[in-house]
Image (cartoon, rainbow, N blue to C red):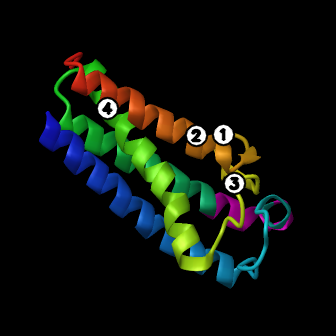
Amino acid sequence: MYLKLLLLAVFGIAMAHLEGVVVVYLRKSLGMLDAESTREPVEKMESKWIRIEMTREAATIVMLVAIAWLAGSTWPERGVFFLWTFAFWDLFYYVSLYLLIKWPPSLRTIDVLFLIPVPWIAPVWFPVAVSALTILIIGGLYIFGVF
């Protein structure tokens, strides 16, 4: 189980960096590389670009579900593996963006977290905290032999 959790974490981190690089290119091409918050630029985007972005988000979730499905053998295990990998992906997505372009400038920076099914808007500290807590809880459950 330890090896699966480790490999899923590595997968989540690699996927986060890949997505971070894509977002840097998107921000550059859409003229929002230096925007502090993503809320205003996203609200001004043409609906065509919003729909394209939604397909990228959907593809991300599909990849996370697929890897959890392949790694797990029961529904609860697959759910835990999905949450574990999602947490590493989400946390390291922000780490990657910060290392690449020094964004977000602060954990209080407002971000558009998801567009599906409707825009989720919150300060960056919120997904970072939820992801870190998820990693700690699942890691603790593993350490204490719950699964």
Callouts 4 and 1 close, C-beta under 8 Å:
no
Cα gap from disc 2 to disc 4, whole angstroms: 15 Å
**Secondary structure of residue under mark 2:** helix
Q: Please tell me whether mark 1 or mark 2 is closer to you in this view.
A: 2
Cα gap from disc 3 to disc 1, whole angstroms: 24 Å
For marks 3 and 4 on the same chain, the one whose residue lies earlier in the sequence: 3
Q: Which mark is residue 129?
A: 2
For marks 3 and 1 on the same chain, the one whose residue lies earlier in the sequence: 3
- In the rendered image of this protein, does residue 19 appear above or below residue 54? below
The answer to whether residue 80 shows anywhere in this view is: no
Q: Which residues are magenta?
A: 43-52
Cα gap from disc 4 to disc 1, whole angstroms: 30 Å
Label 4 sits on residue? 139
Cα gap from disc 2 to disc 3, whole angstroms: 10 Å
Residue placed furthest toward the top: 146
How far from the left and from the top, in percent, is residue 15?
Answer: 38, 60
How far from the left and from the top, in percent, is residue 26?
Answer: 62, 76
Q: Residue at x 54, y 53 (%)?
A: 57
Q: Please tell me whether mark 3 or mark 1 is closer to you in this view.
A: 3
Quadrant, the N terminus: top left
Callouts 3 and 1 close, C-beta under 8 Å:
no
Label 1 sits on residue? 117
Label 3 sits on residue? 107
Taking the magenta stretch, the answer to whether it contains residue 126 is: no
Q: Residues within 10 Å of mark 4 (few under 14, many from 20)?
A: some
**Secondary structure of residue under mark 4:** helix
Q: Amino acid type of disc 4?
A: Gly
Could you tell whether 1 is left or right of 49 in the image? left
Cα gap from disc 3 to disc 4, whole angstroms: 24 Å
